[in-house]
Amino acid sequence: MKGPAMPYHWISDTELEASPHRSLSPNGFAGVIGLFFVLVLVPLLAFLGTLALWGLLPFALLALWGLWWGLRRSYADGAITEHLVITADSCRLTRAGPRGARAEWSCNPYWVRVTSHEAGGPVKHYVTLSGNGREVEIGAFLSEAERKRLYPELRAAFRAAQEGTAPEAP
């Protein structure tokens, strides 16, 4: 079940790990903060040695702090990991969310139904697993194309678990 780089990957034929794509690397974060600092500093150089510099400096530093805080908060809010393990007699989905939030769902894989909701969900091609009296979403942070690709892979993995065979690569 391997393919092009995705924000999810199959650790084995029966174990999936997914997390949101991070478009800004730590080096990119430092670059954005540094570039913003320089761009704010350039106009302030005209006021060097004047009293007006001290009036403008707090606002420039506040803007820099606001950008830093906003990017750090975005990283923290996107710290999500979903881990799905499918065995012959059980499956467990664990979601570790921002600020330590955890949620778990488990079921017998024989009764799991994998569904792609093309419309009517919060996003197009919303993928859910249902069983044991509950329906849970998986990969809500994935793009539409990634959810479309994940859906048949999940169906194949659960079909293999139900039949007791190894899943075929899509």
Image: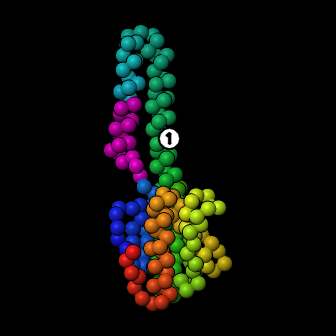
Q: Residue at x 55, y 75 (%)?
A: 114
Give the x, y percent position of residue 18: 45, 65
Give the x, y percent position of residue 115: 57, 72
Instruction: Name the residue tied to disc 1.
Output: 70
Q: Label 1 amino acid? A: Gly
Q: Is residue 92 above or below residue 77?
A: below
Please state, as top left, top right, bottom left or bottom right, where the C terminus lies in the image: bottom left
Q: Which residues are magenta?
A: 22-36
Q: Residues within 10 Å of mark 1 (few under 14, many from 20)?
A: few
Q: Residue at x 63, y 80 (%)?
A: 132
Give the x, y percent position of residue 159: 49, 83
Q: Residue at x 49, y 77 (%)?
A: 155
Q: Is residue 115 above or below residue 5?
A: below
Count of labels in the image: 1
Give the x, y percent position of residue 124: 57, 59
Q: Is residue 146 above or below residue 161?
A: above
Q: Which secondary structure, mark 1?
A: helix
Left or right: 126 in relation to 152: right
Q: Is residue 48 above or below residue 155?
A: above
Left or right: 21 in relation to 4: right
Q: Residue at x 50, y 24 (%)?
A: 59
Q: Is residue 50 magenta?
A: no
Please state, as top left, top right, bottom left or bottom right, where the N terminus lies in the image: bottom left
Q: Is residue 25 magenta?
A: yes
Q: Nearer the viewer, residue 32 or 170?
A: 170
